Image (cartoon, grey):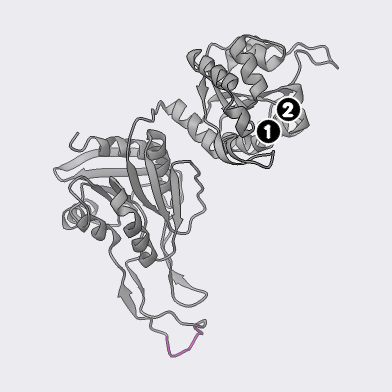
Amino acid sequence: MYGKRILLGITGGIAAYKIAYLIRSLKKQEAEVKCIMTPASSSFISPLVVSTLSENEVSVEFWNKETGTWNNHVSYAEWADVFLIAPATMNTIGKMANGLCDNLLLATYFSMKGKTIVAPAMDLDMYKHPSFLRNMDTLTKDGVSIIPAENGALASGLEGEGRMAEPANIETYLTAYFKNITPKAVGKICITAGPTQEAIDPVRYISNHSSGKMGFAIAKAALLRGYEVELICGPSQEELVHPKLNRTNIKTAEELLKAVQNCWHQCNLGIFSAAVADFRPAKMSSTKLKKGSAEEVIDLVQNPDVLKWASLHRDNKQKVVGFALETNNEQENALLKLERKNLDLIVLNSTQDEGATFGGEKNKVTIFGKQGLVCDLKLQDKFDIAVKLIDTIEKIDA
């Protein structure tokens, strides 16, 4: 979202407190953020907090009462690449749909030539009220995009549909908009991500440097395309929430296999990007191993091959995509893995590629299919790699 100019409109709902997290995330991705607040919204989040996080002055009224300076709504509208109104209350949505303009936020909306996106937030009965539904239909016809409210606990104490989409989901929606990704796919994908950890004793384990970033990027790209996602991940600091995402956390290769077995029959596709330990200690010590102990040699046994299991147990409609991280003879080893495990595609990473490091935001990969080279993707953001990988998979037998 680098360099994108996001105008954020904050209205008077309890969900306004979540906006601090959204602003921080957008700024972390180097977006430019300016904010307009309705007078009522300052009861839920301080303009000082919003200004500090966005690194820009916040406008609430048409003019600054102390200086007499006019807050030009037209300038805001011309500046913005997108106008995101979150939370969008029933009151504000009703005024937008019916041409009522009694505050700076609404004046800016009616001056917008670019895209407006709203994230509604209200109680469940309000969210289902016929007048609200009519207003939403009007806004949709006017070209406004709606980020659907989510199910969950509401401020009233009730539980149901109406709570504002979580900041991470709003951010995902913005990413889809800027990347021009349309949610048109149907089906479920099993995606594995991150490392596994094989315990030596209660303190130590065998693992690797995988961060899970590539797998999470693939999951995000798949969700934006419209797929349901079963994300099975080893220990990782990455976070992703979405109504169509089911996340299962695992540690060991055996736990990973069991999780894949539990969901594989429901999935159309498997993308196995997890860095699975090939071996594990034959026996975990119940106490911490000490220096100089008799157990200076740790016997290892081979872990189950999760990718091979999925390939062997698929039907003729399921596709299987593997990853290969190689240090030498990269192409030869990747093609052998593709053939040996009967994969549809294999994604080759190399430790020799400068900039494509563990834990980094970028990657460089080469994708091979059964007929040979499919595409060579230069160093770029892992999310962009993920989008192109999904595109490539969808073209198989298309």
In the rendered structure, does residue 147 fall within the stretch colored magenta? no
Residue 98 or residue 211, whichever sits in front: 98
Q: Is residue 175 left or right of residue 305?
A: right
Helix, strand or loop status at disc 1: helix
- Residue type at numbered disc 1: Ala
The residue wearing badge 2 is 41
Give coordinates of residue 379: x percent, y percent: 37, 39
Give coordinates of residue 337: x percent, y percent: 21, 56
In the rendered structure, does residue 293 fall within the stretch colored magenta? yes
Q: Is residue 213 above or below residue 286?
A: above
Residue 297 or residue 60, whichever sits in front: 60
The reply to whether dot 1 and dot 2 touch (C-beta < 8 Å) is yes
Residue farthest to the right, as pictured: 66
The residue depicted at 68 percent of the width and 33 percent of the height is: 16
Name the main secondary structure of what is drawn in magenta.
loop
Please provide the residue range marked out in magenta: 289-295
The residue wearing badge 1 is 16
The residue depicted at 35 percent of the width and 79 percent of the height is: 282
Helix, strand or loop status at disc 2: helix
- Residue type at numbered disc 2: Ser
